Amino acid sequence: MDKIVSLCRRRGFVFPSSEIYGGLGSSYDYGHYGVLLKENVKARWLEAMVREREDIVALDSAIVLHPHVWEVSGHVGGFTDPLVDCRFCKKRFRADQLDAAQCGQRPSKHPGEAPDCDLTEARHFNLMFETRVGPMEESGTKVYLRPETAQGIFINFKNVAQLARRKPPFGIAQVGKSFRNEITPGNFIFRTLEFEQMEMEFFVPPDEADEWYRYWIDERRAWYLRLGIRESHLRVRPHDADELSHYSSATSDIEYLYPIGWSELEGIANRGDFDLTAHTAASGTKLEWVDSGSGERYTPHVIEPAAGLNRSMLAFLCDAYDEEEVAERERTVLRLHPLIAPVKAAVLPLIPRDAAITEKARALYEQLRRSLAVEYDDGGQIGRRYRRQDEIGTPWALTVDEQTLEDDTVTIRDRDSLAQERIPIAGAREVLLDRLDEPWQSPKAD
Ligand code: GAP
């Protein structure tokens, strides 16, 4: 993990937030390549969930919702972690994860094991951030920053079902920020105070719920594999009965083998009719499906694939990170699937001082940037520029050299195989688009 964190910092993907003030634990800012990578992952998710399907529509609901939403959803009462404090070292721990925590004074021991440890009884601590709406602190209404995007979908069920003219089975997809006052954050962007979720609520006839639950587990697993995650590093883990959330009758996690071990990447839950029924009872608005022809009515059941965008990005980074020796030199390379790589191709003038070469290279760059995320790089030795692009994960580099001036060809260098070939400059765009279209498999060993 340290190597990933260091690469992300060095190349400006992700860095600690509020650094000039000493940082704020577990808040991160995303730099240029981090934004591009995150946007690409989000775009692939929206493409698979919305653009390529006729049965799912998009939504972008508010972050601050009516506070009743969170009472009815069970979050005010039950979205808690059990915590213990140590009166001696003043540190706070998850009561159910003491085995994985380090004692504040003797890191080789777990909390409670060192002679001076003095742990309190476990207390429940709500993970929702509170704030107020209104000009006066005292009279304002207490509201919450949403801890999941899902509730914004449930409370809009009636609007969307009518406007989108869809009948179950159909889904509503949303990507957006969620906030949790995590007390044991850490592990870089794996668990943070604010993060983006990619959630889809799929509304189905009750007797089809099991079938759709299994369907979405397979679909979501296949999505990660299509984007290059190695099969050996992905697994599906069904929850035991005592792990299930209050709303769920079945949940399976898609787990990735992060450097910290197997951990949740995405959860797929069968939420039954819990949410629509609860919001119907509390709001008086019937959140049900009514067939205008037959008059049949029922409350749909919900299958929910809920993924974390930042956590997915971390999995893609971990899976892509590689080091190898080439010509007796170490190279670090991000073997990202080309479709999510922040930059698809770099255009490099071999001799930046040569005006004719630079002019050709700039012209190629200007032409390519209209349809692809490309970068022009003329800073430093060609070897250093290749290494920089390798660390960003750029799949192809196009080098303009003296031969280009004679025959209008450029070399195209492949990030993974390091193979170089000459192609006509006029066909460079098509070559890149064709290669982007090809299925891709990680060349990294398991
Ligand atoms: N609506 C269901 C729900 O929110 P969840 O398992 O709590 O389920 C879904 O969250 C996904 O959101 C997780 O699988 C994870 O990828 C991501 N996630 C949750 N808490 C996170 C945090 N503190 N930091 C980063 N990602 C988080």
Image (tube, grey):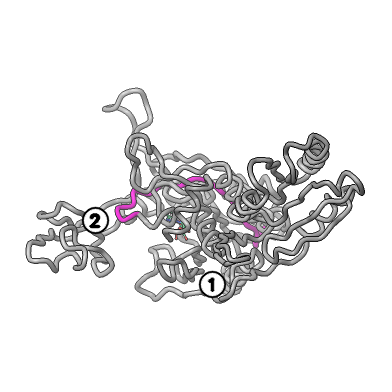
The residue at the point 21 percent across, 67 percent down is: 108
Residue 165 lies left or right of residue 272; in this view the side is right
Q: Is residue 310 visible?
A: yes
Q: Identify the residue shown where x is 57% and y is 62%.
A: 329
Which residue was labeled with disc 2? 124
The answer to whether residue 300 is visible is no
Does residue 183 show up magenta in the picture? yes
**Amino acid under label 2?**
His
222 or 28, nearer to the observer:
28
Quarter of the image with the C terminus is: bottom right
Residue 327's image quarter? Answer: bottom right
Q: Position of residue 45 (x, y in %)?
A: 63, 56
From the top left corner, tell me how far across and down residue 179 is, in percent: 41, 46
Q: Which residue is mark 1?
A: 234
On the rendering, which quadrant does ligand 1 occupy? Answer: bottom left
Whether residue 148 appears in magenta in the rendering, the answer is no
Q: Quick one: 65 or 411, which is closer to the camera? A: 411
Q: Is there CB contact under 8 Å for labels 2 and 1?
A: no
What is the x, y in percent for residue 322?
Answer: 55, 65
Q: Residues within 10 Å of mark 1 (few under 14, many from 20)?
A: many
Helix, strand or loop under label 2:
strand
Numbered range of the magenta stretch: 167-185
Q: Quadrant of the N terminus?
A: bottom left
Residues at marks 2 and 1, CA–CA distance in whole angstroms? 33 Å
Question: Furthest residue to the top?
Answer: 135
Total count of labels: 2
State the mark number for residue 78: none
73 displayed left or right of 174: left
- Left or right of residue 333, residue 350 in this image: right
* Type of amino acid at the residue the image marks with label 1: Leu
